[in-house]
Amino acid sequence: MRAVNSDIQTIDLSYIYAGRDTSALRQVSLTCRASEITLIVGRSGSGKTTLARCINGLIPHTYKGGTLRGEVRLADESLKHLSLAQLARRIGTVMQDPDRQIVATRVFYDIAFGPENLGLPRDEIRARVHEAAEQLHITHLLDRDTHTLSGGELQKVVIAGALAMRPRALLLDEPLASLDPPSARDALAVFRRLADSGLTVIMIEHRLREALGVRPEHAIALNGGEVTFDGAAADLLAWLDAKRNGHSGNRAVSPPRRDGGDVLLAFRNVTFAYPGARQAQLRGVSLDVRAGDVIALIGPNGAGKSTLCKMAIGLIRPQAGRVLVGGQDAGRTTTAQRVRTVGYVFQNPAAMLFANTLGEELAFGPRNLGLADAQIAARIGQALAIVGLDHLPLDQSPFSLSFGQQKRVTIASVLAMQPRVLILDEPTAGLDDGTAEELLDQLLSATARPEAIVMVTHDLMLARRFANRVVLMVAGQVIADGAPDDVLADAEVMKQAGFDPLAGPDTTHPR
């Protein structure tokens, strides 16, 4: 039975960010109904995140100075004059970047934050926290410090915090971006149950085929800030296929693995455990990254992938074992020495972006390497071309960009330093399939590409298409390391990771 008075409607919604000349949204009118899942898709920069910010009130409450026209309504109520706190009680929000939504140092208190602000009794708060944690299978994390969690674990904590508020509507901006396939299936099942119970669920998502598996009733596509499709979700794939009109693309082929390449980065029997964790995040990990490697580092959330990568740049020190960067013990090198060999792009852009303009952001690293202005300008131009953002003015604020564009800016900022090894933590989060594949095409075919690339990813098809080596981690250990078709088709090792094996070599072209 359909819930009463929970439909979300936008009426002639338009928005121009402060300092921008073009509209991020143009007269967007749509209705998202109660008891339904509405799936919103579109390429990076199409207006999806801006639409989400308008619905949950971040525009105009947080993003100030822009020009907003039209309105958003929840049933018969205009949301125009409500505060962010009032909006949060009506519309639960899970944004693309979980770091920005974590407010407490302990998982239990982070999930409890919203109900506490509603003034609920302590027993009610505790019941809501445990109910939300059980829905997402994260009760084992309740006593953990939030800064020790992986990106996927953080994402589940943020989703739990939204559910604990028991809102009338749920707005999900890329909720699957940091989740491994089993966790993504669990989260989608929760969203389906919530919609079936009467909530209005709006899901912005690039992992299209997984999202369609939850049987959304309604789909909307955006392009250039305008609605280009508004209809039954069952018709979306046919519409997208017709729009592509048979275009197959020309993908750069990853080079074959060169076992004899120089060892650029090495982990020797590395062990590490966060305080309060039930088990070590890394347990005797040994791994070489050689020149010529394009490695897809895969595994379930909490397997230790991000922890391992952070060791490469000295953010975390091993409790046992050694990390060698360019043949030297990382613990005995300076930050400047490490970044010349290893560049690390964080999963969430908010962890990296800091400058007022793109020019300042991109010049920061090369300038600290002592490069001349002409060299810096050349490297910035080259890096922006690789990530497909060379059309953007350098005086623009990176914070006015979409999440996907911010992601590409952070990649460019590291590319501008020209490290020998580039580590990309979830490089396709926030990017649609086409943009993600174009980015990797450009990166792999660039003349100044890094000597080795490590991609932490949950996208198994991307691993097969672009990597020449797959390293699979489970519970802090490497359980497989080999050619993509060998590892990804191995039913036994994939089952250990909770993944379904990919059958047969990939012969398809990316979209």
Image (cartoon, grey):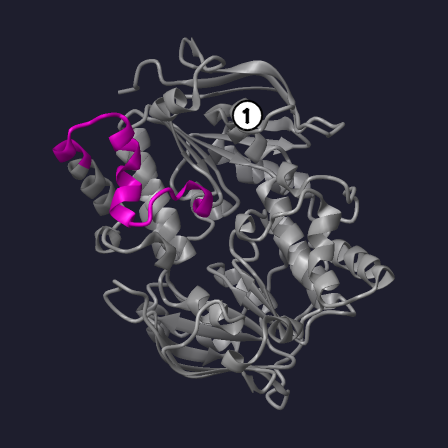
Quarter of the rendering containing residue 313: bottom right
User: Residue 279 placed where, x, y %?
Assistant: 26, 69
Q: Residue at x 44, y 69 (%)?
A: 316
Seen in the picture, residue 8 relative to 480 is either above or below; the reply is above
In the image, is 314 to the left or to the right of 111? right
Seen in the picture, residue 370 relative to 261 is either above or below; the reply is above
Q: Residue at x 64, y 87 (%)?
A: 261
Between residues 245 and 105, which one lies in front from this camera angle?
Answer: 105
Q: Identify the amino acid type marked 1.
A: Ile
Dominant secondary structure of the residues highlighted in magenta in the image? helix
The residue that disc 1 covers is 59
Say whether residue 327 is magenta. no
Quarter of the rendering containing residue 455: bottom right
Q: Residue furthest top?
A: 76
Between residues 27 and 419, which one lies in front from this camera angle?
Answer: 419
Magenta stretch, residue numbers: 98-125
Q: Residue furthest bottom?
A: 260
Tag 1 secondary structure: helix
Residue 310 visible, this angle: yes
User: Residue 470 placed where, x, y %?
Assistant: 50, 74
User: Residue 66 placed where, x, y %?
Assistant: 65, 23
Give neighbour class at mark 1: few <14, some 14-19, many 20+ (Cα, 10 Å).
many
Between residues 378 and 35, which one lies in front from this camera angle?
Answer: 378
Quarter of the rendering containing residue 71: top right
The number of callouts visible is 1
Q: Residue furthest left?
A: 123
User: Residue 477 placed where, x, y %?
Assistant: 36, 76
Q: Quadrant of the N terminus?
A: top left
